[in-house]
Image: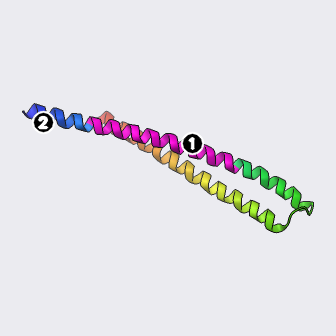
Amino acid sequence: SQHLIFFVSNSFNLIFFIKTIIFIKSKLKLAKADYKSAKTQYELLSEILKAQDIKYDGDAITIDDLLDSNAKVNIAYAKMISSKYEYLKVKYYIDYLYEKGEEK
């Protein structure tokens, strides 16, 4: 009876651990995709800003247009940093879970 309770308890913990790992791994894939997307957007907007700067020097656009492009680049940069932080946070959490699992 006591062995059965121990077995059921450990089985439940193992199932919970496996479900947690699967959930966190899917969260990691999503965080990685978000980071790649944010990085691509930042790179694209940076190139657009360079073009806008050239247009501004040629009096083709106003300072408002140039500042708007600059603001978009800064927002994209902040999103890229935030998504990279989220990715690393999830990655380190997975590492933590694997370490805890090895101790048992």
Question: Which one is in front, 8 or 102?
Answer: 8
Furthest residue to the right?
A: 58
Q: Position of residue 78 (x, y in %)?
A: 62, 57
Q: Is residue 74 magenta?
A: no
Q: Position of residue 29 (x, y in %)?
A: 51, 39
Task: Specify the color scheme.
Answer: rainbow
Q: Position of residue 23 (x, y in %)?
A: 40, 41
Q: Which type of secondary structure does the marked residue at label 2 adopt?
A: helix
Q: Residue at x 28, y 36 (%)?
A: 15
Which circle marks residue 56 in the picture?
Answer: none
Q: Is residue 68 found left or right of 53 in the rendered image?
A: left
Which circle marks residue 33 in the picture?
Answer: 1
Q: Is residue 21 magenta?
A: yes
Image quadrant holding the N terminus, namely: top left
Per the rendered image, the range of residues in magenta is 14-42
Q: Is residue 90 found left or right of 46 in the rendered image?
A: left
Q: Amino acid at mark 2?
A: Ile
Looking at the image, tell me whether mark 2 or mark 1 is earlier in sequence order: 2
Q: Residue at x 85, y 67 (%)?
A: 62
Q: CA distance from mark 2 to mark 1?
A: 42 Å
Q: Residues within 10 Å of mark 1 (few under 14, many from 20)?
A: some
Name the image quarter holding residue 59: bottom right
Which circle marks residue 5 in the picture?
Answer: 2
Q: Is residue 39 found left or right of 30 in the rendered image?
A: right
Q: Is residue 104 visible?
A: no
Q: Which type of secondary structure does the marked residue at label 1 adopt?
A: helix
Q: Residue at x 12, y 32 (%)?
A: 4
Q: Residue at x 93, y 60 (%)?
A: 58
Name the image quarter holding residue 67: bottom right
